[in-house]
Amino acid sequence: MDDRYELVDRNIPWLGNIPRHWLTSRIKYLHRQTGDSFIDGDWIESPQIVDDGIRYITTGNVGEGRFKFQGSGHITDTTFRELNCTEVFPGDLLISRLSPPVGRSCIVPDLGKRIVTSVDNVIIRLKDNLDKHFYNYLFNSKNSYENTSTLSRGTTLTRISRSMLGDIETIIPPLDEQRLISRYLDKKTQQIDTLIEKIEKKIELLKEQRTSRINHYVTKGLDPNVEMKDSGVEWIGKIPKHWEVTKLKYLVSYNDSVLTEDTNPNYQFHYIEISDVDYIDGIKLTDKTIFSESPSRARRIVQPNDVIISTVRTYLRAIGVVPNKSDIICSTGFCVLRDNSGKLDQQFLSYIVKANWFISRVISESFGVSYPAINASALVELEVLLPPLDEQREICSFIQSRLKVSEAQIAHEKRRVSLVSEYRQSLISSVVTGKVRVTEDMV
């Protein structure tokens, strides 16, 4: 047995014991430029760059081991100087100091343009005896995240200081071992990621099947032998003969009440924003806020079982039923629907406005490109289907029983994703810290 691989304690808690022959170093000394340590936009003097083709990348582009392409945009010279940006190059290693998981890293890709980043991304240009792929795995390991988390400060925005990040003790295995570990993890993580992708596709398929069933039952009913008729509305098609088609405004009231500006500034409430509402999973209530600290759009008063439907960015399908709790306020970006006819079950209403044909009509009636929106007054002009009330309740009961089955299936697949993801992290952590030795025959 090669005694070089005996694990020894180097007094670096986040790494644990490491192979005897591995060296250690502070992160800032991994950088290849003599005297520069590592680079950060708040202390290096930014050159004057005037180029409309420059790409600006933020902490949001730094994924957990991968560069995330959303959010990188063009930047002007004025903005460049205001943000105190630093130019980066393909192959540079970026470490994000901001937002969890703090300390995550990615390798800068070739975007075909000059690239700049700002203060909250630390740039490391590794020395020749260091492999960027190995360190990308190391900085995105569970051990590293836990360590940088304990060193971070802040509540709303969690951040680690550049100096504290640079002073973290890390490891330097021999270069051939770094590359061997990188190749092994490339192989294994690709296999794991492929499995996760397959499971996630299955989850999406299960969600689509669930949506398809709801669409069918709220449009055609439960009896496959019922006599059908033409609804008279092209985008609805045929419906059971005894069902009615009517405009939403004849069944519901909408946006009945709002908080006024003289509301007690200390009034506490759960606030529902568009991002808190999912077409499939419903409404997620966050912790209470107080009126004086709430957004100006936090004004729409809702009651339990109200149906809320987003009137902005309608393509997001933010529709849900308000849970049975008091003191809930939603954004003015929602239209709040409440039965005032006695002919409508609120749960059935929620299924109707989630139907593909209804959402398609909402989207087609929306205006705007980046933020398509529909006026609440136009929304309630749309037609809906109206079965007898007892049949509505029967349909809802049937759908809910079917949903329990599909939700259990989806929850099972989500647990699989979670377990496989945990295994992925565990594998990376054990390999990059030398707990598991990688040999050529494993690659």
Image (cartoon, rainbow, N blue to C red):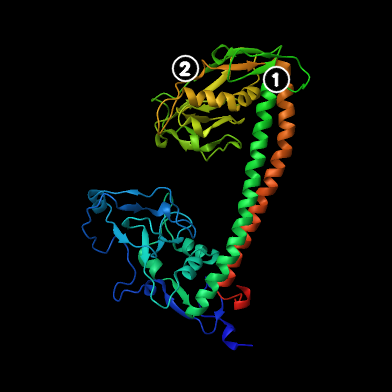
Identity of the residue drawn at 39% across and 25% down:
262
**Quadrant of res 84:** bottom left
Q: Which mark is residue 309?
A: none
Is any part of residue 335 visible from this angle?
no
Q: Position of residue 295 (x, y in %)?
A: 41, 34
Horizontal arrangement in the rendering, residue 129 relative to residue 52 (left or right): right
Horizontal arrangement in the rendering, residue 274 relative to residue 218 (left or right): left
Q: Quadrant of the N terminus?
A: bottom right
Toward the right, the furthest residue is 225
Q: Position of residue 436 (x, y in %)?
A: 61, 75
Relative to 251, residue 271 above or below: below
**Mark 2 vs mark 1: which is more N-terminal?**
2
Label 1 environment density (alpha carbons within 10 Å; few <14, some 14–19, many ≥20): many
Question: Does dot 2 land on a helix, a strand or a loop?
Answer: helix
| Whole-number angstrom distance, CA of label 2 to CA of label 1 | 25 Å
Identity of the residue drawn at 71% across and 42% down:
408
Q: Position of residue 113 (x, y in %)?
A: 32, 55
Label 2 environment density (alpha carbons within 10 Å; few <14, some 14–19, many ≥20): few
Relative to 257, residue 140 above or below: below
Which residue lies under the disc numbered 2? Answer: 377
Q: Position of residue 85 (x, y in %)?
A: 29, 56
Q: How many marks?
A: 2
Label 1 amino acid? Gln
Q: Quadrant of the C terminus?
A: bottom right
Label 2 amino acid? Ser
Question: Does dot 1 land on a helix, a strand or a loop?
Answer: helix
Which residue lies under the disc numbered 1? Answer: 392
Q: Which residue is more in the foreground, 10 or 371?
A: 371
**Quadrant of res 406:** top right
Is any part of residue 350 visible from this angle?
yes
Identity of the residue drawn at 60% across and 87% down:
2
Q: Which residue is more in the foreground, 29 or 317?
A: 317
